[in-house]
Image (cartoon, rainbow, N blue to C red):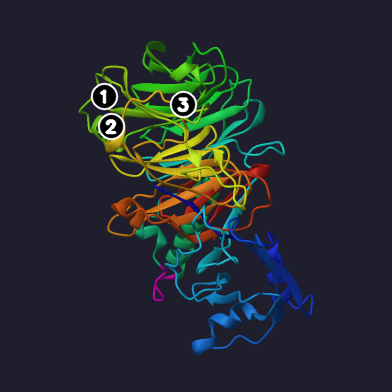
C-alpha cells in the first residue's frame, strides 16, 4: 500500500498555432515553453524553451525531425530534457530526462528526491477541436458519447442553466457503391449522374453532422449525462433537483424523475435502461422505474454525505443488457461520497456490503519536524471507475487517485484516516487539482490503461497494467493530452474508433 507522487509535463497551449506560423515562415523562429514538475523533488520544477525553426523536410531517418517543415533547433535551459519527434504526427513529441520508461525510483511520496525525473512521456496534440458545444465560459460540465445501432456516433454535452445539446460526432461509412471511384471507361452521362449522387450524399452527410438537438427542460446546471446502451436515449441530472429522460433524436422528454431535495450530481442506467439510479447532494441514491417515472428504491449514504459519483460493476451492466436481470434489480453499485468514503451496495437486497474509509496521503506515520513532505487526508470523492469485476479506481477533490481491490473490502465505520483501508492497493497524486473524471478503456490483450481528467487542464493517460496485476508498483504516465489552458477538463471518453475525447473549459471538445 504505497503512495506515489507522479511527475507531469506541460506544454504551451498555443504550441500548435506557433508551429503553423513557423511552418508558414511567418516568423523566422519562435520559442514555446515546456515545463516538468514533481512535487516530491527538492526543486519542484524545471522549465525549458523549445526553439522552433523552419527547415527543409528530409526523408529517411531524419524525416520525423523535420516533419511539417519545422525542426526543434534547440532546447534552452533544458536541464537534461530531451525532445524526440514522433513519426506518426508532426506535432507530437516525446520528452524525457531518463532513458528508462519503467523508472520508478523518484515516485515515493515519503522520500524527497534531489531533482525532477521525467520518464519518456508522449505529449500529444489534439487532432481536432470542436466547440463551443455549450454556451458560457464555464463550458461543458457533463459529457458522454455513444454509437447507436445505425452506426451514428453522437455526443451529449451539458452546461450551465440547463443547456443540454446532442450532436453527431461520426457517421457510418458510406455504402461501397456510393464510395467507388468512377470508372475511367464509363460513359459521360453515367459519370455525371454518379458524380451528382456522390455530391448529394456528401451534402446530406454534412447536414446530418452539423445537426444539433437542443434538449430543453432543466432550469439548473447540468451535473451529469449518460446515454442508454441504445445510444438514442439520454439520462441527465441537474442542480434543479430533477433528472430527465430525453430522446437523442428529437430532444423530447417523456419522463421527469423527482424526489431529491438537493442537486442531483450523478447517475447510472441499469442494463438497457428500464431502471436508473441517481445520486444527490441530499445524501441519497434513488432508484426509478423509467416506464412509470416512479421511485422504487432508495439507498442512504453514510451520514448522508453527498453522493458525488457512482458506477455499476461491469458484470452488473453486462448481465442486465443481455437480459439476465431485466425485470429485477441486480448487481453492485459503487458510490463516491463527499466525506471521502466509498460505498458498495448490492442492488438486489438494497444493502450496503462495504464501506471504504478515507485515508491519509501519503500513507503511514506523520512526517517528522525535519521532513520536507506533508501529509493530508484524501478529500471528497469526485469520480469513480471500475477497472475489472473487483478492481476500482477513485479520484478525489484534492487530486488523489486510489486503486482498490474490492475482494479485500469490508464494512468499516472507522474515522481513523491513519489506518488505510484493507482494499487499498496504492494511491497517487500529481498535484492538488481535483480528479474530475476517470475512464478505463476496454482492452483486448493490450496493457490496461486509465484516462484521467483534472481541474488543472492536464488530462493524461496512464499504464496501470502492473498495478492491476497486484505488484503494487506506481502507474506510469504514458501520454499527456495537451492543448488546454489551466482550466478544468470535466470528462474523458473514447470514441468508436478508440480515439480519446476530452470535454471541458469554454465548451470545447478535443479529439486526440
Circle on res. 138: none
Mark 2, residue position? 316
Q: Name above or below for residue 337 compared with residue 434.
A: above
Return the x and y of residue 123 as percentages of the image width and height.
56, 64
Front one among 341 and 437:
341
Specify which label sits upstream in the sequence, 3 or 1.
1
Cα distance between the residues tagged 3 and 1? 30 Å
Return the x and y of residue 81 as percentages of the image width and height.
61, 74
Check contact, mark 3 vs mark 1: CB within 8 A: no
Magenta stretch bounds? 181-187
Tell me the chief SS of the magenta region: loop
Cα distance between the residues tagged 3 and 2? 30 Å
Q: Is residue 83 left or right of residue 343?
A: right
Q: Is residue 274 left or right of residue 458?
A: left
Specify which label sits upstream in the sequence, 3 or 2.
2
Return the x and y of residue 190 as percentages of the image width and height.
42, 64
Q: Is residue 205 magenta?
A: no
Report the residue at 30% width, 21% height from top.
347
Cα distance between the residues tagged 1 and 2? 6 Å
Residue 204 visible in the shown view: no
- Residue at the extreme front of the image, as rendered: 369
Front one among 385 and 57:
385
Residue 498 visible in the shown view: yes
Front one among 446 and 470:
470
Mark 3, residue position? 415
Report the residue at 46% width, 69% height from top.
188
Which image quadrant for residue 241? top right
Circle on res. 330: 1
Marker count (numbered)? 3
Amino acid at each position: 500500500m504505497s503512495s506515489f507522487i507522479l511527475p507531469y509535463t506541460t506544454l504551451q497551449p498555443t504550441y500548435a498555432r506557433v508551429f503553423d506560423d513557423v511552418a508558414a515562415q511567418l516568423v523566422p523562429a519562435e520559442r514555446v515553453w515546456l515545463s516538468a514538475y514533481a512535487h516530491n523533488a527538492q526543486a519542484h520544477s524545471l522549465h525549458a524553451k523549445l526553439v522552433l525553426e523552419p527547415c527543409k523536410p528530409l526523408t529517411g531517418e531524419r524525416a520525423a525531425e523535420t516533419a511539417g517543415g519545422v525542426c526543434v533547433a534547440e532546447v534552452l535551459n533544458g536541464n537534461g530534457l530531451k525532445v524526440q519527434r514522433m513519426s506518426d504526427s508532426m506535432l507530437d513529441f516525446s520528452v524525457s530526462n531518463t532513458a528508462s520508461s519503467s523508472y520508478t525510483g523518484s515516485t515515493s511520496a515519503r522520500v524527497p528526491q534531489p531533482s525532477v525525473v521525467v520518464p519518456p512521456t508522449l505529449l500529444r496534440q489534439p487532432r481536432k477541436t470542436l466547440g463551443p458545444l455549450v454556451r458560457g465560459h464555464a463550458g461543458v460540465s457533463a459529457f458522454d458519447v455513444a454509437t447507436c445501432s445505425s452506426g451514428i456516433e453522437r455526443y451529449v454535452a451539458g452546461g450551465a442553466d440547463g443547456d443540454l445539446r446532442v450532436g453527431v460526432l461520426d457517421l457510418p461509412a458510406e455504402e461501397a457503391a456510393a464510395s467507388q471511384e468512377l470508372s475511367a471507361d464509363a460513359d459521360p452521362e453515367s459519370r455525371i449522374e454518379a458524380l451528382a449522387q456522390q455530391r448529394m450524399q456528401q451534402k446530406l452527410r454534412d447536414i446530418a453532422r452539423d445537426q444539433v438537438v437542443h434538449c430543453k427542460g432543466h432550469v439548473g446546471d447540468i451535473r451529469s449525462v449518460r446515454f442508454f446502451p441504445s445510444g438514442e436515449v439520454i439520462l441527465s441530472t441537474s442542480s434543479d433537483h430533477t433528472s430527465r429522460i430525453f430522446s437523442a433524436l428529437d430532444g423530447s422528454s417523456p419522463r421527469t424523475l423527482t424526489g431529491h431535495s438537493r442537486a442531483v450530481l450523478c447517475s447510472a442506467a441499469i442494463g438497457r435502461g428500464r431502471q436508473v439510479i441517481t445520486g444527490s447532494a441530499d445524501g441519497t441514491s434513488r432508484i426509478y422505474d423509467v416506464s412509470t417515472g416512479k421511485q422504487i428504491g432508495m439507498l442512504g449514504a453514510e451520514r448522508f454525505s453527498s453522493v458525488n459519483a457512482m458506477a455499476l460493476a461491469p458484470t452488473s451492466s453486462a448481465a442486465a443488457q443481455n437480459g439476465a436481470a431485466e425485470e429485477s434489480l441486480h448487481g453492485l453499485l459503487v458510490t463516491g461520497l463527499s466525506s471521502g468514503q466509498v460505498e458498495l451496495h448490492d442492488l438486489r437486497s438494497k444493502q450496503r456490503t462495504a464501506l471504504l474509509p478515507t485515508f491519509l496521503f501519503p500513507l503511514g506515520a506523520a512526517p517528522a519536524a525535519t521532513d520536507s513532505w506533508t501529509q493530508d487526508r484524501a478529500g471528497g470523492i469526485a469520480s469513480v471507475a471500475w477497472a475489472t469485476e473487483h478492481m476500482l479506481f477513485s479520484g478525489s477533490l484534492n487530486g488523489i487517485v486510489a486503486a482498490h481491490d474490492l475482494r479485500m473490502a469490508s464494512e468499516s465505520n472507522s474515522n481513523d484516516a491513519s489506518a488505510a483501508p484493507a482494499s487499498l492497493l496504492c494511491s497517487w497524486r500529481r498535484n492538488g487539482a481535483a480528479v474530475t473524471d476517470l475512464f478505463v478503456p476496454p482492452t483486448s490483450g493490450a496493457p490496461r490503461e486509465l484516462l484521467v481528467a483534472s481541474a488543472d487542464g492536464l488530462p493524461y493517460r496512464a499504464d496501470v497494467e502492473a498495478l492491476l496485476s497486484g505488484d503494487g508498483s506506481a502507474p506510469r504516465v504514458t501520454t499527456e493530452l495537451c492543448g488546454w489552458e489551466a482550466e478544468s477538463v470535466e470528462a474523458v471518453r473514447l470514441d468508436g474508433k478508440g480515439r480519446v475525447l476530452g470535454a471541458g473549459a469554454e465548451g470545447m471538445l478535443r479529439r486526440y
